[in-house]
Image (cartoon, rainbow, N blue to C red):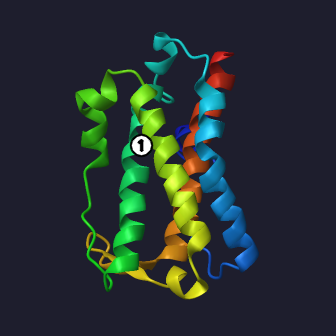
Amino acid sequence: MNLEFKRFPIGQFEEPQHITDTQLEEYIKVIKNFPAKLKSLIENFSDEQFDTPYREKGWTVRQLVNHLADSHANSFIRFKLALTEENPVIKPYQEAQWAELQDSASISIKPAMRMLKGIHQRWYCLLKSLTNKQFERTFHQPEQNRNYDLRICLALYVWHCNHHLAHIENLKIEKGW
């Protein structure tokens, strides 16, 4: 497999021009089901498997799972900020550096899995309650100097879920696990 495919096994995120209500419902289902899909994918992994990078110079599966908890917690908070403030400026963070910290690099994935389960339960509940008007609410991303509405942000995080599931699925295939 080439490096670009290993980095982006489902391709890079392509922002949809229009998101229908039907697509929105599908996205919400992905958020609901993601923790269970991830758990099913990694539930029999050994510590050695968790410490295996999904690609050369890439994160280990352990770091990837902890990254998912960090990233999805940040996204959930960004949704809540956008729903309660007028186009708030969000706080970017150094995700690659976070993945190097000991809570991401060396401990059991169980706390991250518990976080993901709880975050996604709450996120799903929140998403199911939103009106179309609320999905138009925005936050400002200062590094890109642009506003994101919650529909696009949800599409991005559905891609993010599937992107990292594909990393682990491909690693399992490559290693014959």
* Residue 69 rendering spot, x and y as whole percentages: 42, 43
* Residue 72 rendering spot, x and y as whole percentages: 43, 52
User: Is residue 47 depicted above or below 57 in this figure?
Assistant: above
* Residue 25 visible in the displayed image: yes
The residue that appears at 27% across and 41% down in the rendered structure is 98
Residue in front for this viewpoint, 32 or 147: 32
Give the side of residue 4 with respect to residue 169, left or right.
left
> The disc labelled 1 sits on which kind of residue?
Ala
The residue that appears at 26% across and 32% down in the rendered structure is 100
User: Is residue 94 depicted above or below 155 in this figure?
Assistant: above
Disc 1: which residue: 69
User: Is residue 164 depicted above or below 91 in this figure?
Assistant: above
* Residue 56 visible in the displayed image: no
Residue in front for this viewpoint, 115 or 175: 115
Element type at mark 1:
helix
What crowding class fits label 1: few (fewer than 14 Cα within 10 Å), some (14-19), or many (20 or more)? many
Image quadrant in which you'd find residue 140: bottom left
**Residue that sits furthest to the right in the current view:** 22
The residue that appears at 43% across and 26% down in the rendered structure is 109
Residue in front for this viewpoint, 173 or 76: 76
* Residue 164 rendering spot, x and y as whole percentages: 55, 42
Image quadrant in which you'd find residue 12: bottom right
* Residue 177 rendering spot, x and y as whole percentages: 66, 16
